[in-house]
Amino acid sequence: PHAAVGKSDEDLFTEEFAHAARKDELRIFETGVALKCKEEHAEWEDGHMKWVSTTKIPLRGTEGEVAGCIGIGRDITELKQKEEQLEAANEQLRQANEQIEQDLQMAARLQQTFLPQIYPVFVAPGEKPLIDFHYFYEADSEIGGDYCAVHKLDEHRAGLLICDAMGHGVRAALVTGIIRALADNLAREPRAAGDFLTALNRQLHPMLQSKDAFMFATACCLTIDLRTGELTGALAGHPPPYLIQPRQHQAALLPIEEGIAGPALAITDDFAYETFSLQLQPGDEILMYTDGICEAADDSGEEFGSVHLGESLLENCNLPLKELFPRLIETAREYTHRNKLGDDICLLGFSLNGLCP
C-alpha cells in the first residue's frame, strides 16, 4: 500500500480503465451522487485481470460542498468466475432440459400409437356395424400411465382392455408399453377374461417387482360375443364398468358379484382371476374408465367421484359415445374448475347395435 501513495489511476491501471474511473469521479463532484457497487473489469499495469466492485461516495466540506471523494474497491474476481461457471452449468442444464423435452414429445407421439388406431369391424350381411367402439385419452403430462386396447378375438368376439399403471410420467408410461406388448401377444390365443388377466399378471409380475422397485397396474378386461350378446369380464383392482341403456334412460355400474375382483396386476405372482358374465341387449352401451376422472378434485378437495360420474352419464346417456365421452370430461372440469384434472384420463367403451343372425 505504501507504494501507491501519491499515484493516480493512470499510474496503476490501463489508460482506458483510468479514464473511465476519472469520468465517474467527476460526475460525483458535479452531482454529489454516490456510485454504488459498480462492477468493473480492471487490468493492472502488469497485465493481470481482476473483477472489482467499486463504490465511490462524495466527501463534503463544512458548507456541504463536495470537497473530494473516497472509493472502495472489492475484489470479486472469484465471485465472477463462479458466476461464469454457473452460467455455463445453466446453459448445459438448459440444453439437457431441451433435449429431455424433445424426447418426451417424441415419447408422447409414440405412446399415441399404443392406443387404438383402427377398430375391428363386425358387420351383419347388408347391415351396419353390429358394434361401435370409442375411446378418449388424455395424459396429465406429456406421457401417461393409462392404456386401452380393442382386439378382434375371432369373427364373432371382441376383447377390450383398459389399464392404469401406478404413478405418472416416464415410469408409468414404460409400464403401459410392457402391458401393450404382453396383451397383444396374449390376445392371439382364445381365453376367458379371467384367464387373460391371470396370464398377463404372471408375465408382468417379474418385470415390475424387484428389490429396488415396486410397480403395479389395475386392469379391466371385457369380452363381448356378438352372436349371443353375452358380456364376460374380469377385474384386477380396477373400478367396474358402467352399463348404459339409453332406451330405458338408465346408467349404472355393472351388477358384478361382490368379491369377484382380484388384486392389481403384479401385486402377487400367481393369482387366478375370476370371470363374470351378464347378458346385453342391442342398444346397450358399456363404459370402462380409469380412476383419474373420479379422483379429480375441486379447490376444497372434494372429488368428482363415481356418484357425479353416474349422474352425468344418466343426464347424457342419449348421446353417442363420441359425444358422451367429451361431455363427461367437460362436466368434470366444470366441477373442479380446472382444465387439467390432475391425473391421466382414459375412457373406453362400445355400443351394441345388434347381434349376428
Image (cartoon, grey):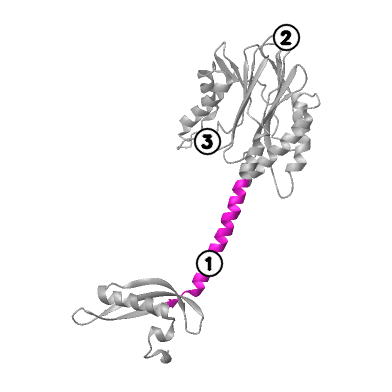
**Residue 316 in sight here:** yes
- Give the residue pinned by disc 1: 84
Q: Is residue 68 above or below residue 216?
A: below
In percent of width and height, residue 16 lies at: 42, 77
Asked which secondary structure carries label 1, the reply is helix
Asked which secondary structure carries label 2, the reply is loop
| Marks 3 and 1, how far apart at CA | 41 Å
Q: Main secondary structure of the magenta part?
A: helix
Asked which secondary structure carries label 3, the reply is loop
In percent of width and height, residue 86 lies at: 54, 64
Assign the C terminus to one quadrant of the image: top right
Residue found at the very far right of the displayed protein:
189
In percent of width and height, residue 214 lies at: 69, 44
- Give the residue pinned by disc 3: 341
Is residue 11 a member of the stretch shown in magenta? Answer: no
Q: Residue at x 62, y 12 (%)?
A: 283
Residue 40 horizontal side relative to residue 274, left or right: left
User: Of residues 196 and 305, which is closer to you in this image?
Assistant: 196
Chain part drawn in magenta: 74-102
